[in-house]
Image (tube, rainbow, N blue to C red):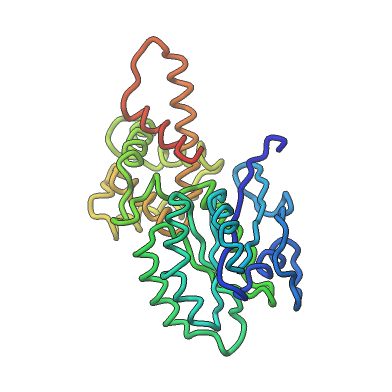
Amino acid sequence: MNGRRRINVAVVGDRGVGKTSLITSAAQEVFSERPVPVLPPTRFPTDFAVVSEPVDVIAFDTSSRPEDAQAVDETIKAADVVIVCFDAQRKGTLQRLRSDWLPRITHLRPAAPVIIACCKDDTEETLPTDQVREFMEGLIREFPVIEVSIRTSSRKLRSVLDVFYQAIKTVLYPKAPLLDASTGRLTTPCVKALLRIFLMCDSDGDGALNDAELNTFQQLCFGQPLTPDELASVRQMVAERMADGLNDAGLLFPGFMYLHTLFLTRGRLESTWTVLRLFGELARQRQQRQRHGSSSSATVAAAAVAQAAA
C-alpha cells in the first residue's frame, strides 16, 4: 500500500454494545441514531494519527448473529489488534468479557493485543465506576493481552479516537517484548539492550551518565536536550524512588532501567521503542562495517529487541 504499513483492527462484542457506532464516530466523527447492522471494512483517514511511520488503519466491524460466528473468528485471526466492546449500561456484556470474548480471542489470536472499550458511557444508568474498575483490574491480571480499558461515548464523540489511537500504538510499540506482564519487570532481552545503550552513552566510562551524557542521549533519540530544570527533576525522581539509581557522578544503570520501566508502565512505550530502534539501527550499521569481526551479545540483543515488532 504505497509503503504504508497496514493495521487490521477487529471490533467485536455482544449484540448492541456499540461496535458499529464506535467505528463510525471515530472514522467519520458523526453519530447515527440508526446505524447499519454491520459496516463494511472501514479505512481511517491517512492523517488519523501521528505515529512513527505511515500506516493504513482498517477497522473490521463484526456481526453478533450466531450464524456469523465463524466469520467473526476469521476476522479475529486476521487482526493485528482486537477492540472488545461492552455496554456501560449492561452488566452482562461486561461479564461476558471474561466468560466468552477474552478466552475466545486468546485462543484464536494469542499474540494480538486487546483494547477494552466501555461504550455508551453517557447516561446516569451506567454501571458504577468502582465496580467496573475492580472488574477490569482482575481481568487485566487474568488476561495480560489487555493493554488498556477506555470509557467512551460515541453519541458525544468522547474518547472514540483514543480507542483506535491506542490500538495503533499497541501494534507499533508492543509491550510484550519489553515488559513481563506477570512481574512488571523488564524482559531479559530488553535489559541487555538497555545495558549496551547505557555503556555506549557513558563516554567517559565512569559507570554513570552525567548531565552532558544524558543530553547527548536525549538529543540523539528525541531531537532536543533536557532543560536544567528537567534534568534536576529526573535526578530528584530517581533519587526518591531508586536508592541505587544515582550517585554523585550521575545516573546509574538501575536508574536508567527504572526510567524505562516507568515509560512502559505509564503507557509511553513509544519512548523506549524509539531508543531501542535507533540504537538497534546503529548496531546493525556497525555489524555491517565489521563483517569479519565478532559482535557482542549485548549488541545482538539490541538489534533483536528493536526488530521484535517487525
> Which one is nearer the viewer's eye here, 63 or 179?
63
Q: Residue furthest left?
A: 244
Q: Residue furthest top?
A: 292
Q: Is residue 57 above or below residue 294?
A: below
Quarter of the picture containing the N terminus is: top right
Q: Is residue 296 above or below residue 230?
A: above
Q: Residue furthest bottom?
A: 124
> Which one is nearer the viewer's eye here, 107 or 6?
107
* Residue beneath the point at 56% across and 62% down: 69
Q: Is residue 114 above or below residue 191?
A: below
Q: Is residue 310 left or right of 98 when viewed as pictured? A: right
Kindly indicate the quadrant of the structure image that contains residue 71: bottom right
> Which one is nearer the viewer's eye here, 177 or 246?
177
* Residue beneath the point at 40% across and 49% down: 176
Q: Position of residue 242 (x, y in %)?
A: 27, 55
Q: Residue furthest front?
A: 67
* Residue beneath the point at 54% across and 79% down: 88
Q: How many numbered circles are shown?
A: 0
Q: Position of residue 250 (x, y in %)?
A: 32, 44
Q: Position of residue 84 (x, y in %)?
A: 53, 65
Kindly indicate the quadrant of the structure image that contains residue 70: bottom right
* Residue beneath the point at 42% across and 53% down: 264
